[in-house]
Structures are given as C-alpha cells and as structure tokens.
Image (tube, grey):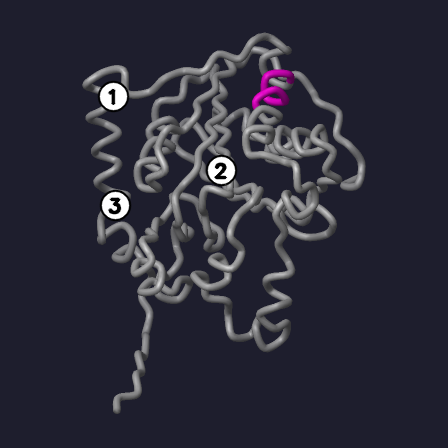
Amino acid sequence: DQGEHFIIMKSKNLKAKFIAGRSYNPWYNLALEEYLLDYLEEDEIILYLWQNDDTVVIGRNQNPWQECRIGDLEAKGGSLARRLSGGGAVFHDQGNLNYTLLIPRKRYNLKEQLNVILVALQNLGFEAKFSGRNDILCQNRKISGTAYYFGNKAAYIHGTILIDSDLEKLVSFLKVSDSKIKSKGIDSVKARVINLSQIDKNITLAAVKESIKNTFAEMYNQGQQLDEIEINNSESENKKINKLYEKYSSWEWRFGKSPDFDISINHRFN
C-alpha cells in the first residue's frame, strides 16, 4: 500500500559507500556520477548526495529549446545540463538536494532502492508516499522526481528532493507545454510541487542528508558506521573525470544531442 510505511529490508553482500558532493557545478557533478557508474564494483552500492547552483537539467533525449528558457537562464547566471537518463526537465538550486544510488545491474530494484529516500523522509515526520513510477509526494504534491539509467554492468537511480528551492525560478526557467498551461494554468502547474520547508518550516538540508545517510546505512550497511569516501585521489582518476566533464560541459552534448526538430523563432521589431 503506497500509504503505508515501508519495512526496511536489509540487503547482504553489498559494500555500502557514501560520497558527499563538494561542487555546485552541474557538469562536474554529472561527470562524477558517470565515473562512479563506470567503475562501480560488482559488490558495491554507493549513495551520492550532491547539489547544483541554478541549473536546468534535461533528459537524455529532450530538446533544450523546447524545455527551457535558455536565454533567461544564462542571463541570470544559470547553466543548462543534459543527463544520461531519460525523463523530463528539472530545475536545481541549492535549496534542492540530489541523490544518486548506484548499484550493480543485477541488483537493480527501483522500489527497494527508492525506499531509502521514502523511509528517510518518513523518519523526519513527513507523510511521504510513492506516486506512479517515479514521483514521491507529500500532501499530494510532488517533492521528488526520479529517473534511472543502465550502464553495461551497473545502474543508477537518481532524483531531486525539494527542500527550500526557489519555485519562482523553477516556473520561470522551465517551459511548460501549451497544452498543460491551457488545461491547468501556470498557477496550477506551480501548485503541483511543494518544498519540504512549506510543510515543516524547521526542516534543514543537513537534516535531510543525515536521515538519508542513516537510512541507507541501516538498509545496506546493517547499521554499521557508514564511511565517506573521497574522490580525486589520483592523477588517473582526475583525468577520467575531467574527460567526462569536457563532455557534459560541451555544446555538442548539451545542445547537439537534441533530436531532429523544426523551430520557428519570432520577434516583433519597432
């Protein structure tokens, strides 16, 4: 039952590791995510928590011009990024926490792994529940969206958690489809999402991170101390991450990977 609290099932034979993102650069964070995917051991599971400065992140097969007001975003110092996974466009800022759970392909189980996030929120007192395949709701409004990707040997599940995000920016930078605006109106579209801070004004990002870490440790590390691992410890590691960074920051990846489309640009001159 989606309305019930889930029982945490302990999964044996996986080494649980935790990584805290140190950068707010979306291209670096996505590069690190892909690096972790490529080099995940078959007996590992990794929780990676990270944040971006103002960024619109589009799905692998999306058209950036169709999903984002790129000129407004870049004029205000924001960035456009394209991720490996599919799904829709999302807005990130420092009031939003991103999570990535990396697991061997043969151990991929969306509902089991997403229990980490669901139970962590429930442990903080939020009446969180699953909705459809990819969303987590509180008070019947979306606080988290999820996407996933399968590599050759490993997979990841990643998503957002709205804690104290600027919803005005979210609405202004993301393009909502005309059909959705006509049927629901912009105010209604905005009303579909909610920050945790709107439910509990005392919630902090640090508290959410700690709850996710603790739930992850209980589920996959059998309650033992969860050690944080550091990245960028070797020249070889740096070189591989930097190469991925070049990809994620490039025009070719962010814009050139768009599917074929026709576009008409209109402007009224004096």
Q: Secondary structure at mark 1?
A: helix
**x and y percentages locating residue 228 in the rendered image:** 45, 15
Q: Quadrant of residue 164?
A: top right
- Residue drawn at x 51%, y 75% is 178
Q: Is residue 18 above or below residue 171?
A: above
Residue placed under numbered mark 3 in the picture: 249
Q: Quadrant of the C terminus?
A: bottom left
Category of crowding for the residue at label 1, using alpha-carbon neighbours closer than 10 angstroms: few (below 14), some (14–19), many (at least 20): few
Residue at 61% of width from left, 68% of height from top? Answer: 187
Secondary element at image label 2: strand
Q: Amino acid at mark 2?
A: Asn
Q: Which residues are magenta?
A: 213-218
Mark pair 1, 3: CA separation: 18 Å
The residue at which mark 2 appears reads as 98
In the rendered structure, the answer to whether residue 228 lies left or right of residue 122 reads left
Going 31% across and 53% down the picture, which residue do you hit? Answer: 77
- Up the image or down, 203 lies above or below 135; here it is above
For disc 3, the neighbor class at 10 Å (few under 14, some 14 to 19, many from 20) is: many
